[in-house]
Image (tube, grey):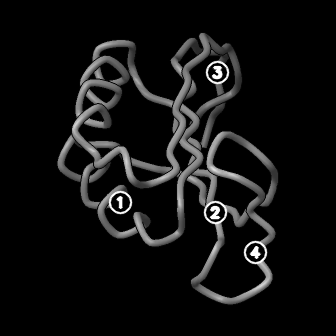
Amino acid sequence: MSFSLNQGTLVTIVSETVLQDRLIKLLITLGVSGYTIVPVQGTGSHGRRTGDMAGYNTNIEIKTIVTSEVSDKLLEELKHFPETYALIAFRQNVEGLFA
């Protein structure tokens, strides 16, 4: 396998863990070929997220590198998630070694 320097759009989503399956389904629907999910904790507009009980008051961070077109579609679809859930998403242009 050979690596080359490429450009892409890194999309980062931080949300309540309860949304994980819905977010994965959305990524697959949009044709995303890979993503990384990690548990996270912190404080924000929805209060402190300590992750002290499995499945309750816990957050995840999902990162994926996609084309700018896919990032547009992804962010647009995320607008339709209920506002009652804690969710933040942002994107950055990145350059890196992708297979």
Q: Disc 3 residue type?
A: Ser
Q: Which of marks 4 and 3 is nearer the N terminus?
A: 3
Tell me the mark number nearer the camera, choosing from 4 and 3.
4
Q: Earlier in the sequence, mark 1 or mark 2?
A: 1
Mark 2 Cα within 10 Å, few/some/many (few <14, many 20+)? many
Tell me the mark number nearer the camera, choosing from 1 and 2.
2
Q: Measured from the top left, where is residue 50 in percent x and y?
A: 81, 69
| Residue closer to the observer: 46 or 20 | 46
Q: Do the residues labelled 4 and 2 touch (CB within 8 Å)?
A: yes
Q: Disc 2 residue type?
A: Asn
| Residue closer to the observer: 60 or 5 | 60
Instruction: Kindly identify which numbered label has been placed on residue 4.
Output: 3
Determine whether the residue tagged by mark 3 lies in a helix, strand or loop: strand
Q: Disc 1 residue type?
A: Ile
Tell me the mark number nearer the camera, choosing from 4 and 1.
4
Measured Cα–Cα span from mark 2 to mark 3: 33 Å
Residue tagged by mark 1? 24
**The C terminus, quarter of image:** top right
Residue tagged by mark 4? 51
Measured Cα–Cα span from mark 1 to mark 3: 27 Å
